[in-house]
């Protein structure tokens, strides 16, 4: 049995930008974790493409994160445009469903880290108009908006203004990479669904990038989702597809409705994956293992597609009410 895949996070733009064409290939056929030829075998595919930036890029590449943000955006737009027969950028949930009905894939633009636009809440409106639909406040650094899971500080006033403005626009706030303190600061002020686009269960594998049970429950309470991250480091020691299922089954114990678990593979942003998972083509194997572990097929369909769609729809409703 095969399910459509709605994946809330990848680093494919950075992967394609950071390697030569010979090394990386292209969005159509790449040497990384995601390409359209492999994804074509799925009965529906919506991929959120993150534009990832951090101030550390100055040191890593000698380039401003603002320049890199623009290049990553241009990379996704170019690659999608070169493959218009297979995929298009979707700006609304209806476009995602229409693409799926027409046998076409969807790309959704998302923001990972806000260094690429100077942490400025006033620029979120322009970014929304460009097509960005999900945003985090930062990556692993401490920045003017918040601390991260590596530094610990909570939200600044500017960080609170950022959350309010994103939600006013209908841009979904993403808490992956944030500090625990920042997470709870967002929960204090949120008025819409909050997502962790690529974070797993800390009770199953103790890592600061993963969500505690209390954090996961709080996300459920907002109507948001946690997207399952395929990076081995966040799953367990020498993880297999069964370890992947352990995280999902734990979340299902906390959320028996199964409405708050989704996918967010972090593909092309990580080197090691679980045994049995090699890239986007492995999602059917993960689904199969979940079915074998007793997860009903309706719940697998929710995890693989419906729950992420539900968040996108909730964000649009919010946007209509508030603008
Ligand atoms: Zn990440």
Image: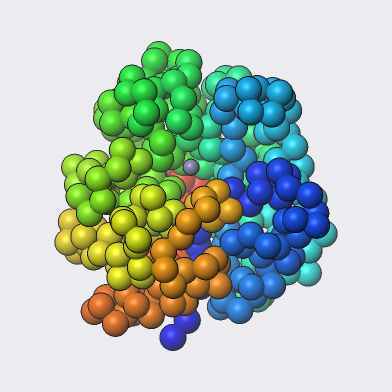
Instruction: Name the residue nearer the viewer: 258 or 37.
Output: 37
Figure label count: 0
Q: Where is residue 244 in the image (x, y as percent from the top left)?
A: 33, 64
Q: Quadrant of residue 241?
A: bottom left
- Residue at the image position 78 percent from the left and 63 percent from the top: 83
Q: Position of residue 6 (x, y in %)?
A: 50, 62
Q: Can residue 123 be seen in this view?
A: no
Instruction: Name the residue nearer the viewer: 161 or 41.
Output: 41
- Residue at the image position 76 percent from the left and 59 percent from the top: 25
- Colour logic: rainbow
- Residue at the image position 31 percent from the left and 38 percent from the top: 208
Q: Can you say which quadrant of the picture contains the N terminus?
A: bottom left
84 lies left or right of 184: right
As drawn, which residue projects farthest toward the bottom?
Answer: 1
- Residue at the image position 75 percent from the left and 37 percent from the top: 71
Q: As displayed, is residue 121 above or below residue 207?
A: above
Q: As displayed, is residue 163 above or below residue 5?
A: above
Q: As displayed, is residue 59 above or below residue 17?
A: above
Q: Where is residue 191 in the image (x, y as percent from the top left)?
A: 35, 35
Q: Is residue 19 visible?
A: yes
Instruction: Name the residue nearer the viewer: 127 or 265.
Output: 265
Q: In which quarter of the image is residue 128?
A: top right
Q: As displayed, is residue 235 above or below residue 279?
A: above
Q: Position of residue 115 (x, y in %)?
A: 58, 25
Instruction: Name the residue nearer the viewer: 269 or 136.
Output: 269
């Amino acid at each position: 049995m095969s399910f459509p895949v709605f994946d809330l996070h990848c680093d494919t733009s950075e992967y394609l930008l950071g390697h030569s064409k010979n090394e990386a290939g292209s969005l159509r056929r790449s040497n990384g974790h995601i390409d359209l030829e492999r994804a074509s075998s799925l009965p529906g595919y919506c991929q959120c493409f993150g534009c990832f930036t951090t101030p550390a890029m100055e040191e890593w590449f000698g380039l401003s994160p603002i320049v890199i943000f623009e290049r990553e955006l241009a990379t996704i737009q170019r690659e999608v445009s070169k493959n218009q027969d297979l995929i298009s950028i979707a700006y609304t949930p209806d476009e995602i469903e229409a693409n799926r009905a027409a046998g076409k894939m969807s790309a959704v633009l998302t923001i990972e880290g806000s260094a690429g636009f100077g942490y400025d809440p006033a620029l979120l409106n322009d970014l929304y108009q460009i097509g960005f639909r999900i945003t985090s406040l930062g990556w692993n650094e401490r920045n003017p908006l918040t601390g991260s899971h590596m530094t610990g500080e909570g939200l600044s006033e500017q960080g609170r203004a950022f959350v309010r403005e994103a939600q006013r626009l209908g841009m979904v706030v993403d808490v992956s990479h944030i500090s625990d303190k920042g997470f709870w600061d967002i929960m204090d002020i949120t008025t819409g669904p909050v997502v962790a686009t690529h974070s797993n269960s800390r009770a199953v594998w103790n890592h600061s990038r993963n969500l505690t049970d209390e954090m996961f429950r709080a996300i459920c309470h907002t109507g948001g989702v946690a997207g399952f991250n395929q990076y081995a480091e966040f799953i367990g020691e020498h993880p297999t597809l069964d370890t992947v299922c352990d995280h999902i089954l734990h979340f299902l114990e906390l959320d028996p409705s199964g409405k708050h678990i989704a996918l967010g593979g972090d593909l092309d942003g990580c080197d090691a994956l679980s045994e049995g998972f090699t890239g986007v083509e492995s999602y059917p194997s993960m689904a199969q293992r979940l079915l074998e572990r007793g997860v009903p097929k309706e719940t697998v369909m929710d995890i693989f597609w419906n729950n992420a769609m539900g968040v996108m729809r909730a964000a649009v409703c919010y946007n209509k009410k508030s603008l």
